[in-house]
Image (spheres, helix red, strand yellow):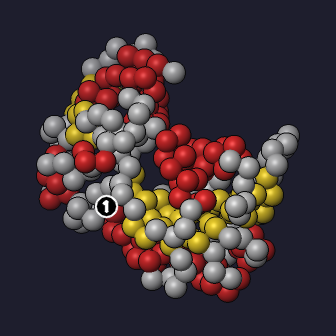
């Protein structure tokens, strides 16, 4: 059955993948964007200009929406929480859409990290919103690691997490496909985590991304102090029992 599905952050790395899959599935897609429809865009999408930081335009975008896939995020931890709060409040005022939220594996296992505390708070806001809801936690995306290497392309060395910190990255396309699937289904509460097919150290992943770009500089692993770093080193960011991703990191960076 076709639903009207609003995607926040629909122009971002993950949001674009959600929109792509929803269109393939012939859903009615809306995108909330501060800039509105990009010039030259011809996709069958209804664009709404709005800002989650101020609440401007939210009610217009939400009116008539059956589902909201909340992919929008921001750098400031408290801003992330306030954006989610404004979204849930506006959604309650306009109806009872199914709210689908993307979070991160391990956010409740990294003590003292403000960003992680904010994600846990966003999850709570969704769960206690009074709306039908689904929350998916995913591991880090391949693009995050590859992007970090690209951002350091002018440095004499490449800096990453050291101390044996292991990651289990997943392709953002697979995360987008899973979110689209959840959006088309009934509210499911907290669903099983989504993780990539392999566990590698951050240094190994950084070297692989560098080689794919033809970069052969030394990789320096940084050991961070505190309980959060020890938790990450001990596997807090992993979900080995949910290694359902199919695209490995080397395959991703080669393509």
Q: Quadrant of residue 201?
A: top left
Q: Quadrant of residue 220?
A: top left
Q: How many marks?
A: 1
Q: Nearer the viewer, residue 91 or 146?
A: 91
> Under tag 1, what secondary structure?
loop
Q: Is residue 61 left or right of residue 243?
A: right
Residue 243 shows up from this direction: yes
Q: Nearer the viewer, residue 29 or 26?
A: 26
Is 216 drawn above or below residue 125 in the view shown? above
Residue 16, position as x, y percentages in the image:
63, 45
Residue 103, position as x, y percentages in the image:
42, 60
Residue 113, position as x, y percentages in the image:
29, 62
**Tag 1: Cα neighbours inside 10 Å, few (<14), some, or many (≥20)?**
some
Task: Determine the residue positioned at 73% across, 49% down.
Answer: 26
Question: Given the current orientation, which residue lies at the most extreme front position?
Answer: 1
Q: Is residue 149 left or right of residue 98?
A: left
Task: Determine the residue positioned at 54% across, 47% down.
Answer: 176
Q: Nearer the viewer, residue 238 or 74?
A: 238
Task: Determine the residue positioned at 34% across, 14% down.
Answer: 216
Residue 85, position as x, y percentages in the image:
53, 78
Say which residue label 1 marks. Answer: 107
Residue 103 shows up from this direction: no
The quarter of the rendered structure image containing the N terminus is bottom right
Task: Determine the residue positioned at 35% across, 54% down.
Answer: 193
Is 246 drawn above or below residue 218 in the view shown? below
Q: Is residue 253 left or right of residue 52?
A: left
């Amino acid at each position: 059955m076709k639903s009207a599905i609003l995607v926040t952050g629909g122009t971002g790395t993950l949001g674009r993948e959600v929109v792509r899959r929803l269109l393939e599935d012939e859903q009615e897609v809306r995108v909330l964007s501060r800039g509105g429809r990009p010039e030259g865009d011809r996709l069958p999408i209804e664009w709404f200009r709005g800002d989650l930081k101020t609440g401007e335009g939210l009610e217009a975008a939400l009116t008539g929406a059956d589902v909201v896939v909340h992919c929008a995020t921001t750098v400031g931890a408290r801003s992330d929480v306030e954006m989610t709060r404004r979204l849930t409040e506006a959604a309650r005022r306009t109806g009872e859409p199914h709210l689908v939220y993307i979070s991160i594996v391990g956010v409740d296992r990294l003590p003292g990290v403000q960003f992680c505390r904010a994600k846990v708070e966003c999850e709570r806001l969704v769960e206690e919103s009074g709306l039908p809801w689904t929350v998916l936690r995913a591991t880090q995306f391949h693009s995050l690691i590859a992007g970090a290497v690209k951002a350091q392309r002018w440095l004499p060395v490449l800096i990453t997490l050291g101390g044996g910190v292991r990651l289990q990255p997943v392709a953002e396309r697979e995360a987008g496909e899973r979110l689209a699937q959840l959006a088309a289904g009934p509210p499911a509460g907290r669903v099983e985590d989504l993780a990539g097919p392999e566990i590698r150290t951050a240094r190994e992943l950084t070297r692989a991304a560098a080689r794919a770009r033809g970069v052969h500089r030394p990789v320096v692993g940084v050991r961070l102090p505190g309980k959060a770093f020890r938790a990450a080193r001990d596997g807090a960011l992993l979900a080995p029992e949910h290694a359902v991703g199919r695209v490995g990191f080397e395959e991703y960076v080669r393509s």
